[in-house]
Amino acid sequence: MSDGHYCFVRDLGPVKGGKGMKHHEVIIDFNRRGIMTFVRGMFAKVRELRLVQTLNIRLGMRNRS
């Protein structure tokens, strides 16, 4: 990035009327804060999936494939 730190970004395409500028979304910053935020987000997703599975089992909504 322009401030000197490294990060992984996803290109979202050109800015409307931006004369070549592009939107981007930062996926992960390669510094202590960015990595901790990424790891916390991953654990939150895993915990959410487990909670949904537990609720589905308690409510009797098992996946019957």
Image: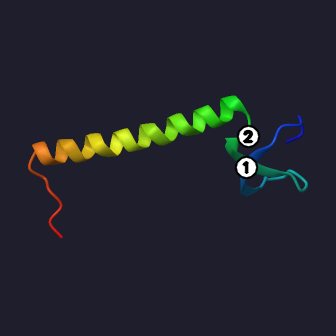
For residue 8, the mark is 1
**Residue 4: percent from the left, percent from the top?**
89, 37
Q: Image check: 4 left or right of 51?
A: right
Q: Position of residue 49 (x, y in %)?
A: 33, 46
Would you say the residues marked 2 and 1 are in contact, meaning their CB atoms lie under 8 Å apart? Answer: yes
Q: Is residue 22 left or right of residue 20?
A: left
Q: Is residue 3 left or right of residue 63?
A: right
**Which numbered disc, 2 or 1, marks the residue closer to the eye?**
2
- Name the outermost residue toward the front: 32
- Name the residue that disc number 2 marks: 30
**Between 10 and 54, which is closer to the camera in this rendering?**
54
Q: Quadrant of residue 55?
A: top left
Residue type highlighted by circle 2 = Phe
Please tell me whether mark 2 sits on a helix, a strand or a loop.
loop
**Mark 1: which amino acid?**
Phe
Q: Is residue 37 above or below residue 13?
A: above
Q: Secondary structure at mark 1?
A: strand
Q: Could you tell which of marks 2 and 1 lies nearer the N-terminus?
A: 1
Label 1 crowd bin: few (<14), some (14–19), many (20+), radius 10 Å:
few
In the image, farthest residue toward the left:
60
Q: Looking at the picture, how far across and down is residue 64, in whole percent? A: 14, 66
